Amino acid sequence: MSKAFERLPGFRDFYPEPLPHPEVASADLRRHIFDTWREVARRYGFREYDGPPLEPLELYTAKSGAEIVGQLYHFVDKGGREVALRPEMTPTLARLVAAHHRAYKKPIKWYTIPQLFRYERQQKGRLREHFQFNADLIGEADPAADAELIALLIDTLRALGLTAQDFVIRLSSRNAWRDFYARGGGAPEREYDFFQTIDKLERETPEVSAGKLQALGFSLEQVREFIQRGEPSPELQGILDNLRARDMGDFVKVDYAVIRGLAYYTGPVFEAFDRQGEFRAIAGGGRYDNLIHLISGGKVDLPALGFGMGDVVLGELLKARQLAPALRAQVEVLCVVEDETLRPATLRLVQQLRQAGKAVEYSLTPAKADKQLKRALELGAALVVTLRRGEGGALLAHWKNLATRAEQVLPPDQWPWP
Ligand code: HAM
């Protein structure tokens, strides 16, 4: 016997609803999420872009940071190039913008929905592939841009039915931490080590964190005190005021425990979490004012910021809050072939209806009429139509509305809607 193949761990199979097994993913839920992402991006004036799923390995080793580099799917291609499946979109975006930014008015506001690949340790909310909504704004250094992007993040989650009771944006800033670090006499070349230690505070034991901080000249108490005080810096206060003016104050709180792991962030950073703390981060982002300069080899210098929101945690959260939409009927009209001699005429009708934009089903092979009607009910079709010969042999279309039971008899080229 030959073996049956299975999918790789950490990858998903997407099936249409109703799902055949609890361990497969819903293609319908995915489309609902993608449609909402696109719709809210449109409302905020963001344009769609994309790039290749395979990139030079160096694009990530340059500035993404140790954690993501350790999770890369990479190999040498047949041309001897070191390549990697994209684990995130930001370096690709920086590359695209650096190459052709002159063709676009600033600020550039772009979004994309790439599939990303990270060889992660398997855990709840973390897979080895995921789709990530990325929205980025390039060419504006003012914190008004940070507020605009956080507003987009909030509205995206609201458009999916989540409220201020369901999620919160934890807002912080590497500028605030940079000041803290400099005030405490930290060595500039070890700043990123310090940021990484802060990033891991919630995941590592106090002993491990205290040891690392001590090696950098800081105490855990000092750091905890700064986080607990949580005093908004003037920059963060500006962002908060901007969001309050939009009635979005309830969705944000200053939380210096957030600093983000990726190496390229420079200014304000933020993460979206569910309020009950059951799930991992829903989204994360921030300012990266030096990345385009670095990726362009020093040729282009543009301030930038953005966020990424994955579909995995979001999908789990929507299901847990009963916000995954009920399955909508896809079929609008079912054409019944009662008399096989009328199959060619029915096919013509099917074609006309589809050309008129209706979603139409019919039985591909001869079947009993009541079986065909049963199928119409299963599919949730609103209308059923059957061709029959009238007096003198003229063809007539018998329409039935399955919800109201109303019936109408019309010539085959007329529909029961205007
Ligand atoms: P990130 O924090 O690495 O940021 O990922 C953003 C979001 O993607 C996470 O909050 C999570 O929802 C989702 N995510 C990440 N890894 C996985 C995984 N293995 N499985 C499932 N979901 C995952 C970035 O990637 C930045 N490039 C975002 C950004 C855009 N910053 C500026 N612009």
Image: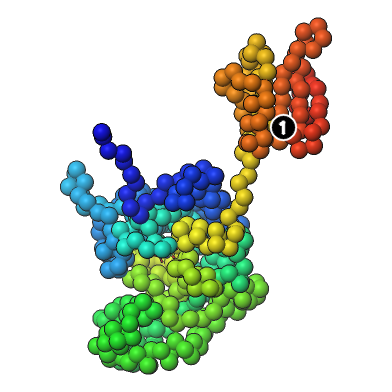
- Judged from the image, the quadrant occupied by ligand 1 is bottom left
Is the residue 363 above or below the residue 205 in the image? above
Percent coordinates x, y for residue 146 in the rendering:
51, 71
Hey, what amino acid is under mark 1? Leu
Is the residue 131 above or below the residue 239 in the image? above
Q: In this view, does 164 lie to the left or right of 20?
A: right
From the viewer's side, name the closer residue of 124 and 71: 124
Quadrant (top left/top right/bottom left/bottom right) for the N terminus:
top left
- Looking at this view, name the residue that lies furthest to the left: 80
Percent coordinates x, y for residue 302 in the rendering:
41, 66
Q: Is residue 320 left or right of residue 247?
A: left
- Looking at this view, name the residue that lies furthest to the top: 392
The residue sitting at 51% across, 58% down in the picture is: 315
Q: Mark 1 points at which residue?
A: 383
Residue 59 visible (yes or no): no
At mark 1, the secondary structure is strand
Dot 1 alpha-carbon crowd within 10 angstroms: few under 14, some 14 to 19, many 20 or more = many
Percent coordinates x, y for residue 11 in the rendering:
37, 51
From the viewer's side, name the closer residue of 235 and 400: 400
Is the residue 80 above or below the residue 105 in the image? above
Q: Is residue 372 left or right of residue 37?
A: right
From the viewer's side, name the closer residue of 258 and 335: 335
The residue sitting at 47% across, 51% down in the picture is: 22
Residue 293 visible (yes or no): yes
Q: Would you identify the image quadrant in which residue 321 lies?
A: bottom right
The residue sitting at 39% across, 73% down in the picture is: 260
Asked whether mark 1 lies closer than 8 Å to ligand 1, one says no
Percent coordinates x, y for residue 77 in the rendering:
21, 46
The residue sitting at 27% across, 68% down in the picture is: 66
